Image: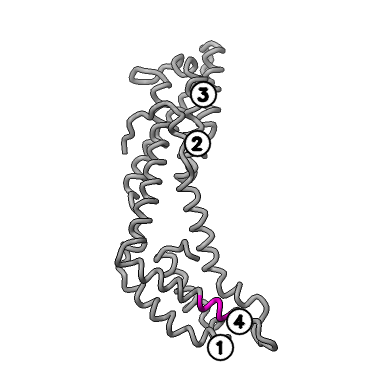
Amino acid sequence: MRNMTLGDLRLSLRDLLDTRVDELRLSKTGKLYEPRLRRKQHEIEAIPEPALTQAPLAAELASTDERHDGFGTGIHYLCLAVEAHPALPAAKKNAAKRIRETFVPQLGVLRRPYADEAAAALDARKELDRLVFDLKAIATPGGGDLLAWVSDFIAAGDSIDSLLRERAKLLAGAENAAITAPLRASTLGLLGRFRDALRDELEEEGSPLPAGHEASLFSYIDKLSVHRASAAAQSSAPSEDATLPARAPAQA
């Protein structure tokens, strides 16, 4: 549970003290800890909503994703148009097919989570050199060629990656702020002590509590904790940018 944010703890206490309150009160430990948990809940609920729920850089990510998806859509449909054109040479059609299948095989790839789009940009950048002649062979409306469009598409994906990393830093900084850190730490400590005491009660001979009581009571808390750990691992994954060509300027 140590990786949970105050927002996670707010949701956890709502689940524990509202949705599962009857289950909580089945144990002597639950009855003992309920007032203490409610005091923590009141303190967390008193924190202004934006401080707990507003994701940093949301507007910047949305704008960059729109640019990324716009280029991706243009690349996909232009390649399809070249592939379908009856009068174009087979070499150009084959080039368009290779480009589409490499960068935007289906429009569905543009609806994936931000982290997936950022990872795809990293992989796609490695294909630029391999397909550079194909990309230069296909002109785009307004002048230029598909190399420029694909480069901008990948640059937008790189920018999404940068924004996600910056968001992770901002969230970590907010979580360690002097105002919120003590409340978060004390709430986590209280939940941990409650769980340990509940386990002791469950181990008592002749305990009337049902099998799986602890797992059921903490199921939502554990789910949030696993989700938070997964998100943290994904955002902190090492970047391979040092081995790749320089990024094109990002536009948010």
Residue 252 is covered by the magenta coloring: no
- What residue sits 32% from the left and 45% below the top? 60
**Which residue range is magenta in the image?**
193-198
Q: Which residue is mark 3?
A: 99
Q: CA distance from mark 4 to mark 1?
A: 11 Å
Circle 4: element type: helix
Mark 3 element type: helix
In the rendered image, residue 248, in percent from the top left (x then y), is placed at 36, 28
* Mark 1: amino acid: Lys
Mark number displayed over residue 120 = 2
Q: Nearer the viewer, mark 4 or mark 2?
A: 4
Q: Is residue 249 above or below residue 222?
A: above
Mark seen at residue 14: none
Residue at 45% in and 44% down: 114
Mark 4 → mark 2, Cα distance in angstroms: 48 Å
Residue type marked 4: Asp
- The mark that comes first in sequence, 2 or 1, is 1
Which residue bears the numbered disc 4? 200
- From the image, tell me which residue sits under label 1: 28
Q: Earlier in the sequence, mark 3 or mark 2?
A: 3
